[in-house]
Image: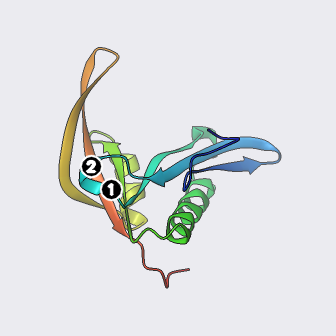
Amino acid sequence: MIQEPPPQMHTLVAEDDGEVIGFANLGAAREDDVLGLGELFAIYVHPDAWGRGAGQALMAETLARLRAEGFGEAILWVLEDNPRTRRFYELAGWRADGTVKDEEWLGTRIREVRYRITLDSDAS
């Protein structure tokens, strides 16, 4: 999927001195109620690199790529009990849209919250 991604899918990588310190994966939303929207599937920065701007750079490029692909809106899912990450998304302009889902992961029930953002085509 990285070498030959599906249409509209991108994997971005943040590097520091030639070492990968983070990544983001984005593309077209997959769920029926949000078809036609973009989705940030994953964004991760190694904890040793937190606070150095890699996450902000990945987010800025993610939003730019989603706009370039023609999406007017995008979604993402985040664990409900992850305040640090939720603050990061909210500072970037994402807002919870009221949709939640419960999943089972490694034998534990987790709750995810959906966030949404409007992608202003005039934004830089």
Q: Position of residue 29 (x, y in %)?
A: 39, 52
The single residue placed furthest to the left in the displayed view is 98
What number of labels is visible? Answer: 2
Q: Position of residue 51 (x, y in %)?
A: 57, 53
| 22 vs 109: above or below | below
| 10 vs 68: above or below | above
Taking depth in this image into account, of 96 and 36 the one nearest to the observer is 36
Q: Position of residue 83 (x, y in %)?
A: 32, 46
**Quadrant of the drawing holding the N terminus:** top right
- Name the element at disc 1: loop
Q: Which residue is mark 2?
A: 32
Horizontally, is 75 left or right of 111 in the view? right
Looking at the image, which residue is at 57% across and 39% down? 47
- Name the element at disc 2: helix
Give the number of the disc on residue 94: none
Contact between labelled residues 2 and 1, with CB atoms less than 8 Å apart? yes
The kind of residue tagged 1 is Leu
In three-dimensional space, the C-alpha distance between marks 1 and 2, rounded to whole angstroms, equals 5 Å
Q: Position of residue 118 (x, y in %)?
A: 36, 71
The kind of residue tagged 2 is Asp
Q: Local crowd at mark 1 within 10 Å, few (<14), some, or many (≥20)?
A: few
Q: Which residue is mark 1?
A: 35
Looking at the image, which residue is at 27% across and 19% down? 108
